[in-house]
Image (cartoon, rainbow, N blue to C red):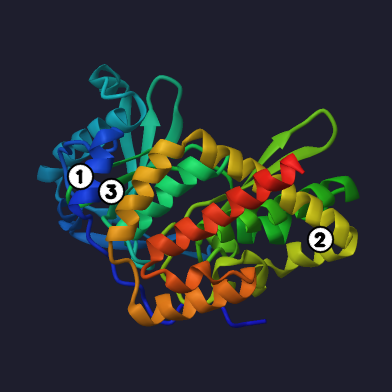
C-alpha cells in the first residue's frame, strides 16, 4: 500500500503561552548566545558527500573569519548547556570542526560537529527552527517511549541532542543479513516501534526518519528503533500515516516479520509494548496530563485533517469516543486513554 505521502509540506506551528509555561516548569527553556537566524549569515555552502561520494543532502557552511571565532565559542557554550548542565569550564576542551545545513524538512536544521580536544572524540547537536508539533513529539517520546530525549528551547530556536545509531535505510540495506535469531529480534522491535508511533500519533516513520541502535548481548544483538524526526506529530489525516508498517521503505523488515512470526506472536509483542506504554503513562500521569491539556488548546492541524482522522480512528478502534474530538490533542489523549484502559483491564482479567 503506497498511500503514505504527506499531503504537502507541513507548516511550522508557534509555541503557545501554555506550552511555554509547561516547558519552563520542566526545565526545557534556556537563554541562548546564538539564535537560529544568526546561523544563516554564512558566506558559502558546499555539498557534503559520504564516503562513497554520494550526496548526503547536507551542505557544509562557511562563515567570515571575523565572525567565526565568536560563532564557534557560542556553539560550544550551547553544547555545554545541553550536555553538561551549563558547566562552562568544559568549553576550553571543546572545538567546532564542522557546521552542516540541511535544506530539506520542516525545521531546516544546522548540524554542529563538536570535538573534545582531550580525546579527539566527536559528538553532534542540532539547531532548528521552532515548531510546536516537533516539541510535542519530543515530549511524548520522552514520556511514553523507553528513550529519554534531551533538548532545549527558547522563543525562536530549538536545540536537540544527536541520537546515535544507524539510519534506518542504511540498516535495511546493510544489516539484515544476520542470524535467524537476530532477524526475529529485529522484527519484534519493529512491531513495538509500530505500536509506539500509532498510540501517540507520530507520523511519517519511513526508514530514513528513524535510527537503529544495536547493542551486543550475551547471545546475538539487541535492537532498539528510535524516531529522530518528530515534525509529523499529529498533523496528517490518514490513520495509516501513523503506522510505520504501511511505508514501502520499511518493507524489508516487514517481510522478515512475515517470514518468521506467527499472528499469535505478533499479538503477544503488541500487547507487551502496549502494556509498557500504559505503565509509562501511569508513571508520569501528572506531567502527561499537563502536556495533553496544552496540546488540546493548540492548533496543530487543519479542521479537515482532524475530521478525517477522527473518523478513521473511530472505525479502527470501533469506538465513537473519537467522533466528539475537536482537535489533535484530544485525539492523542483518547488514543492513549483507550490504550491504558484496555491494557490494565486486560492485566487484571
> For this view, does 293 lie left or right of residue 141?
left
Q: Is residue 11 visible?
A: yes
Residues 202 and 315: in front is: 315
- Secondary structure beneath label 2: helix
Q: Quadrant of the N terminus?
A: bottom right
Residue 241, quarter of picture: bottom right
Q: Which residue is mark 3?
A: 158
Nearer to us in this view, 2 or 57: 2
The earlier-in-sequence mark between 2 and 1 is: 1
Q: Which residue is mark 2?
A: 257
Q: Which residue in the rendered view is the most extreme toward the top?
A: 89
Within-10-Å neighbours for mark 3: few <14, some 14–19, many 20+: many
Check the image and name the residue furthest to the left: 66
Q: Decide: marks 2, 3 in contact (CB < 8 A)?
A: no
Q: Position of residue 181 (x, y in %)?
A: 88, 46
On-image quarter of the C terminus:
top right
Dot 1 crowding, Cα within 10 Å, few <14, some 14–19, many 20+? some
Residue 308: image x %, image y %?
47, 81
Q: What's the distance in space between the residues labelled 2 and 3, CA to CA?
A: 37 Å
Report which residue position mark 1 lands on: 154
Amino acid at each position: 500500500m503506497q498511500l503514505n505521502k504527506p499531503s504537502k509540506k507541513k507548516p511550522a506551528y508557534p509555541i503557545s503561552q501554555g506550552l511555554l509555561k509547561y516547558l519552563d516548569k520542566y526545565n526545557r527553556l534556556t537563554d541562548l548566545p546564538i539564535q537560529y537566524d544568526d546561523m544563516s549569515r554564512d558566506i558559502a555552502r558546499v555539498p557534503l558527500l559520504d564516503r562513497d561520494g554520494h550526496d548526503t543532502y547536507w551542505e557544509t557552511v562557511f562563515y567570515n573569519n571575523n565572525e567565526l571565532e565568536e560563532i564557534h565559542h557560542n556553539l560550544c557554550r550551547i553544547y555545554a548547556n545541553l550536555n553538561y548542565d551549563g558547566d562552562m569550564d568544559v568549553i576550553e576542551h571543546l572545538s567546532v570542526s564542522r557546521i552542516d545545513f540541511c535544506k530539506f524538512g520542516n525545521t531546516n536544521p544546522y548540524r554542529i560537529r563538536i570535538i573534545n580536544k582531550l580525546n579527539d572524540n566527536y559528538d553532534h547537536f542540532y539547531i532548528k527552527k521552532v515548531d510546536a508539533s516537533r516539541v510535542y513529539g519530543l515530549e511524548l517520546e520522552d514520556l511514553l517511549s523507553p528513550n529519554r530525549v534531551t533538548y532545549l528551547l527558547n522563543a525562536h530556536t530549538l536545540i536537540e541532542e544527536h541520537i546515535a545509531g544507524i539510519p534506518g535505510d542504511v540498516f535495511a540495506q546493510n544489516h539484515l543479513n544476520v542470524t535467524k535469531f537476530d532477524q526475529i529480534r529485529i522484527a519484534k522491535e519493529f512491531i513495538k516501534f509500530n505500536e509506539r508511533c500509532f498510540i501517540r500519533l507520530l507520523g511519517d516513520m519511513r526508514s530514513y526518519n528513524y535510527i537503529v541502535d544495536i547493542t551486543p548481548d550475551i547471545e546475538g544483538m539487541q535492537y532498539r528503533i528510535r524516531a529522530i524526526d518528530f515534525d509529523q506529530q499529529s498533523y496528517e489525516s490518514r490513520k495509516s500515516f501513523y503506522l510505520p508498517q504501511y511505508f514501502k521503505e520499511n518493507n524489508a523488515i516487514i517481510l522478515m516479520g512475515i517470514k518468521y512470526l506467527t499472528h499469535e506472536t505478533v499479538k503477544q509483542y503488541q500487547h507487551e509494548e502496549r502494556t509498557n506504554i500504559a505503565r509509562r503513562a501511569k508513571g508520569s500521569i501528572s506531567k502527561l496530563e499537563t502536556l495533553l491539556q496544552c496540546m488540546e488548546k493548540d492548533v496543530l492541524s487543519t479542521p479537515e485533517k482532524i475530521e478525517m482522522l477522527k473518523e478513521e480512528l473511530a472505525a479502527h478502534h470501533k469506538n465513537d469516543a473519537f467522533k466528539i474530538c475537536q482537535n489533535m490533542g484530544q485525539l492523542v489523549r483518547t488514543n492513549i486513554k483507550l490504550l491504558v484502559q484496555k491494557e490494565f483491564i486486560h492485566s487484571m482479567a
